[in-house]
Amino acid sequence: MTVLVTGGAGYIGSHAVLALLEAEYTVLVLDNLVNSSRESLSRVERLAGRQLTFIEGDIRDRQLLDKLFAEHAIEAVMHFAGLKAVGESVAEPLAYYANNVGGSVTLFQAMADAGVRRLVFSSSATVYGEPECMPLSEAAPTARASNPYGQSKLMVEEVLKDLARADARWSIALLRYFNPVGAHASGEIGEDPQGPPNNLMPYIAQVAVGKREKLSVFGGDYATRDGTGVRDYIHVVDLVEGHLRALEVLKHCTGAHAWNLGTGRGYSVLEMVAAFEAISGKRVPYTLQARREGDVAECWADPAKARKELDWQARRGLEEMMADTWRWQSKNPDGY
Ligand code: NAD
Ligand code: UDP
């Protein structure tokens, strides 16, 4: 079976491509390399011992998409392509809506015209807005996000729900990621942010490897066990296993289905720092700073729906997340 993976050269996409190749899928990657490099896919090919087809191009290029669907027997799409920096999305909302919403709609139109109606979409726990009670199940209401990035995820979910209502032949997974971290156990592929990392885990790793002086902890006065923000961190390899399960399940069901991909456990920022120090043997100096705008105090998943319907659950614990992050970062201090 042939799967088109958009954004397959990126952090999560590259791990998904590896898992797909290992599971004997034929893989086509479409990526414009705006936030990634071709090197990630060369390493994926080496690890898998199999080849993929790479097309450098943009999901907003309708002609290119039509050509891909015409030339390859694509049966499903995993759609990772998009821009993901929250702060940048506030400064450049049009770029975010054009890429993440416009690009997605163009992709779905090309799929519809080609008769390809099986889709796994990278959504996010950000669609829950500023939730009141934890853990978050898929039944929790979605809400306007505090930034255009989050809003673009919510908008694409709405587009896909309308699409599934309008045409019952579509099979769609809306995978709501909590906080993906970690790297493949080989240390060959991992997260390679361009410029200063926006997310906690790559920032910690870059401090440990000596690329950044210290971590700024955003907020020490939340109503949490140590005052710092609590999140549900999930190992990227567990996350992509959830994608492969969703792809299987979509073969036998139609409609648009939301599934949380999280562990169901929350850790604070300081717990993450301590766990990383323990595994790496490196010190991670930090200073407490003001809260970051738009952050919630706590967020973790109720993963029961995915466990029941996808027969999937996260298996890798905090130590493995830390050890794999450190292996990737220390083997590749400057990324790819
Ligand atoms: P990433 O930036 O590493 O990967 C995204 C890939 O898409 C990159 O390789 C980039 O070059 C490509 N891309 C961007 N715009 C494109 C376009 N118009 N056409 C073709 N390719 C394009 O990000 P990631 O962390 O791997 O995230 C993958 C997906 O998961 C994104 O949609 C992201 O919003 C979503 N997500 C990520 C997280 C997270 O914490 N990493 C959390 C929730 C959801
Ligand atoms: N965080 C932090 N310093 C950083 C980056 C993040 O203290 O440099 C905190 C942030 O406030 C949140 C947690 O780490 O409590 C996870 O943030 P991240 O940006 O990784 O993911 P988010 O949950 O915001 O998507």
Image (cartoon, grey):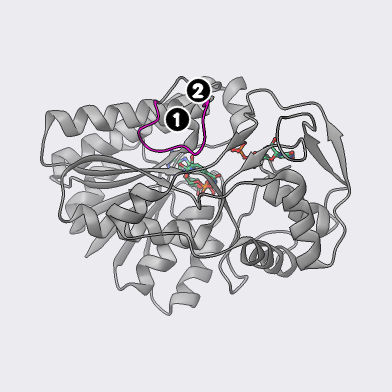
Q: Which residue appears at 25% of the width and 31% of the height? A: 161
Where, quadrant-wise, is the N terminus in this rendering?
bottom left
Q: Would you identify the image quadrant in which residue 329 lies? A: bottom right
Q: Would you identify the image quadrant in which residue 302 lies? A: top left
Amino acid type, label 2? Ala
Q: Is residue 54 above or below residue 115?
A: below
Q: Residues within 10 Å of mark 2 (few under 14, many from 20)?
A: some
Q: Which residue appears at 15% of the width and 55% of the height? A: 252
Disc 2 secondary structure class: loop
Write down which quadrant ligand 2 falls in. Answer: top right
Q: Which residue is mark 1?
A: 127
Q: Which residue appears at 24% of the width and 62% of the height? A: 2
Magenta region = 131-141
Q: Which residue is mark 2?
A: 145
Decide if residue 297 is on the left or right side of residue 16: right
Q: Residues within 10 Å of mark 1 (few under 14, many from 20)?
A: many
Disc 1 secondary structure class: helix
CA–CA distance in space, label 2 to label 1 = 7 Å
Do labels 2 and 1 touch, CB within 8 Å?
yes
Q: Nearer the viewer, residue 147 or 290?
A: 290
Where, quadrant-wise, is the C terminus in this rendering?
bottom right
Point out the tag, 2 or 1, that comes first from the N-terminus: 1
Residue 4 position, x and y percent, is 30, 54
Decide if residue 143 is on the left or right side of residue 105: right
Q: Would you identify the image quadrant in which residue 168 lies? A: top left
Q: Which residue appears at 41% of the width and 67% of the height? A: 19
Decide if residue 169 is on the left or right side of residue 136: left
Is residue 120 something that shows in the picture? yes
Amino acid type, label 1? Val
Residue 317 position, x and y percent, is 59, 63
Is residue 96 something that shows in the picture? no
